[in-house]
Image (spheres, grey):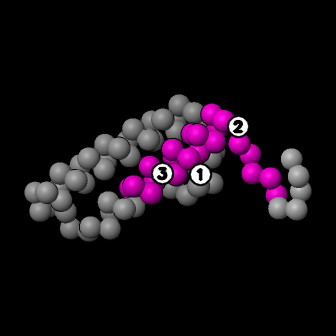
Amino acid sequence: MKTKEIRALSAADLLKQLEEAHQELLDLRFRLETRQLVNHREIPRVKKKIARLNTIIKERESEIRQVPSGKKA
């Protein structure tokens, strides 16, 4: 899921996506330990997804908006 798509989600959907991503990461870690994980690159992908979700949630909480370069807020 791209950042643009994540920003379009509601707050409840963001929290739901975050919970699902944490569950997916847990499942991937179990599969890694039991040597059932085929693609090891899935773990960093899910971690990045969690980081994106957390960043957007924090932005909304503090109402930080990016100001276009060259303009002052």
Q: Which residue is mark 2?
A: 63
Q: Which mark is residue 51?
A: 3
Q: Amino acid at mark 2?
A: Glu
Measure the C-alpha gap from mark 3 to mark 2. 18 Å
Q: Position of residue 30 (x, y in %)?
A: 17, 51
User: Residue drawn at (88%, 62%), measured in percent from left and top?
Assistant: 70
**First in sequence: mark 3 or mark 2?**
3
Looking at the image, which residue sits at the far front? 72
Q: Tell me the magenta residue range.
A: 46-68
Can see residue 24? yes
Q: Amino acid at mark 3?
A: Ala
Relative side of 47 to 69, left or right? left
Dominant SS in magenta: helix
Callout 2: 10 Å neighbours few (<14), some, many (20+)? few
Measure the C-alpha gap from mark 1 to mark 3. 15 Å
Q: Which residue is mark 1?
A: 5
**First in sequence: mark 1 or mark 3?**
1
Q: Secondary structure at mark 2?
A: loop
Q: Which mark is residue 18?
A: none
Q: Position of residue 31 (x, y in %)?
A: 17, 55
User: Residue drawn at (38%, 46%), measured in percent from left and top?
Assistant: 21
Can see residue 9? no
Residue 61 is covered by the magenta coloring: yes
Q: Of residues 64 and 29, which is closer to you in this image?
A: 64
**First in sequence: mark 1 or mark 2?**
1
Q: Amino acid at mark 1?
A: Glu
Relative side of 32 to 55, left or right? left
Residue 55 is covered by the magenta coloring: yes
Where 57 falls versus 40 (above or below)?
above
Q: Position of residue 13 (x, y in %)?
A: 52, 36
Q: Secondary structure at mark 3?
A: helix
Q: Secondary structure at mark 1?
A: helix
